[in-house]
Image (spheres, grey):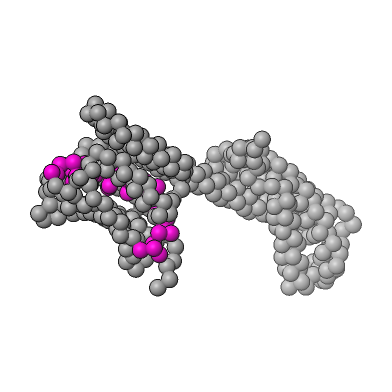
């Protein structure tokens, strides 16, 4: 079973150990360079003892890391507080180890001038520093060093937490968009089914069994084809046009003398991908407001052309003139198409409509090309 991301540690042991070792190696290097610049004697011995302090520092910082890791997924303020408070005892432990390694364990002279003092103990005696003053002084230095590492740890953990939140937000946004696309896609089928069943009922009541049988067969083919595709996947323009042919064959049973259909799409554009059933509301609109309201033959033209890097799909009818406010009705109609384009392409696609003077209506889709076309 997959674990929830929030239960995983923000920073693993390996990365934590590498940063700890890196910090203390930097510590030993800086102090060694400082001693070399000041020309301290016994450089080799001092370097060995700095390495001993660095090793103790690695162990103490690892303990601090364990404490900080227990505060993962807590608020940023809580983690910062743990870092500042937890660094206090760690700094005191380091200061005590540092004091023992340099002052109590085989003291050595740090100065070439004997008058200054042979050992650190001699220097402290001249300065009047007590044991606890010495520990406090060393603790402050190590405290800020530990705080620097803790800040790095908290910053890396917080940045990773932000990235996790961004990825989760992106997944939620994608899921919401997918749900929206599914909802808009499935709005088309019930709307079309309602109209077709009304037409089928009319054929049965008027004693036209053959026409009714043909409509049922075409309806079955239409739904078998349309429902077999994933609403989130695009289809080729050829498949989309074939679906509209099935739909228009169904409608031709209702309007055998009034409906004329023309398909004008170049072969090289048939492989372009478009949202499934994106033309359905446009063709249905042409039937509803162009063919059904006319007493003369009405031609519906489905065409496609390329314009630079976009694909332009048009559904045109030469039906009777109607009020532009009536086109699209109160159902999903053109609004559904616009919503689907917005959810799928954002601002990269659009639907334009135009009333034709003297009668007719043009619905024009502008979509990005899904693949390059040889010129």
Residue ranking furthest to the left: 358
- Counting from the top left corner in percent of width and height, residue 231 is at 43, 43
Task: Specify whether residue 227 is in view.
Answer: no
Seen as rendered, the residue at the extreme top is 205
Return the residue nearer the eye: 4 or 249: 249
User: Does residue 354 appear in the picture of this structure?
Assistant: yes
Q: Position of residue 105 (x, y in %)?
A: 88, 54
Q: Which residues are magenta?
A: 266-295
Q: Does residue 159 show up magenta in the picture?
A: no
In this rendering, position of residue 354 left or right of residue 185: left
In this picture, residue 247 sits left or right of residue 38:
left
- Residue 359 pos. (x, y %): 12, 52
Residue at (44, 66) in percent of width and height: 372
Quadrant showing the C terminus = bottom left
Q: Is residue 162 above or below residue 113?
A: above
Report the front residue among 90 and 63: 63
Residue at image coords 37%, 66%: 309
Q: Is residue 370 above or below residue 166?
A: below
Left or right, 83 with respect to 119, comes to left
Quadrant (top left/top right/bottom left/bottom right) for the N terminus: top right
Q: Residue at x 76, y 51 (%)?
A: 58
Residue 109 appears in which quarter of the rendering?
Answer: bottom right
Which quadrant of the view contains residue 121?
bottom right
Which residue is rendered at x = 30% and y = 56% of the image? 263
93 horizontally vs 167: left or right: right
Q: Residue furthest right?
A: 106
Magenta stretch: residue 276 in it?
Answer: yes
- Looking at the picture, how far across and down is residue 101, in whole percent? 84, 54
């Amino acid at each position: 079973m997959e674990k929830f991301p929030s239960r995983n540690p923000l920073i693993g042991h390996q990365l934590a150990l590498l940063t700890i070792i890196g910090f203390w190696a930097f510590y030993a290097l800086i102090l060694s360079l400082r001693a070399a610049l000041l020309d301290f004697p016994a450089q080799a011995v001092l370097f060995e003892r700095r390495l001993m302090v660095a090793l103790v520092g690695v162990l103490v910082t690892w303990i601090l890391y364990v404490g900080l890791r227990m505060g993962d997924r807590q608020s940023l303020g809580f983690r910062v507080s743990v870092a500042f408070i937890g660094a206090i005892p760690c700094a005191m432990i380091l200061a005590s180890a540092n004091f023992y390694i340099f002052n109590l364990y085989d003291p050595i002279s740090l100065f070439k001038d004997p008058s200054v003092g042979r050992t650190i103990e001699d220097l402290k005696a001249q300065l009047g520093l007590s044991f606890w003053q010495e520990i406090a002084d060393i603790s402050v230095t190590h405290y800020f060093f530990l705080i620097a590492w803790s800040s790095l740890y908290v910053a890396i953990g917080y940045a990773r937490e932000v990235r996790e939140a961004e990825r989760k937000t992106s997944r939620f946004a994608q899921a919401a968009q997918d749900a929206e696309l599914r909802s808009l896609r499935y709005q088309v089928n019930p709307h079309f089914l309602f109209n077709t069943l009304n037409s089928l009922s009319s054929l049965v009541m008027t004693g036209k069994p053959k026409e009714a049988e043909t409509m049922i067969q075409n309806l079955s083919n239409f739904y078998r084809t349309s429902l077999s595709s994933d609403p989130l996947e695009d289809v080729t323009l050829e498949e989309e046009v074939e679906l509209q042919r099935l739909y228009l064959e169904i409608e031709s049973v209702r309007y055998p003398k009034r409906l004329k259909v023309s398909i004008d799409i170049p072969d090289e554009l048939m492989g372009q991908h478009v949202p499934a059933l994106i033309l359905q509301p446009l063709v249905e609109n042409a039937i509803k407001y162009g063919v059904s309201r006319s007493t003369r033959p009405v031609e519906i033209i489905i065409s496609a052309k390329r314009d630079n890097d976009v694909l332009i799909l048009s559904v045109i009818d030469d039906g009777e003139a109607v009020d532009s406010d009536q086109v699209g009705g109160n159902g999903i109609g053109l609004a559904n198409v616009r919503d689907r384009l917005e959810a799928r392409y954002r601002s990269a696609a659009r639907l334009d409509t135009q009333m034709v003077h003297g009668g007719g209506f043009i619905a024009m889709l502008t979509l990005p090309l899904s693949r390059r076309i040889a010129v």
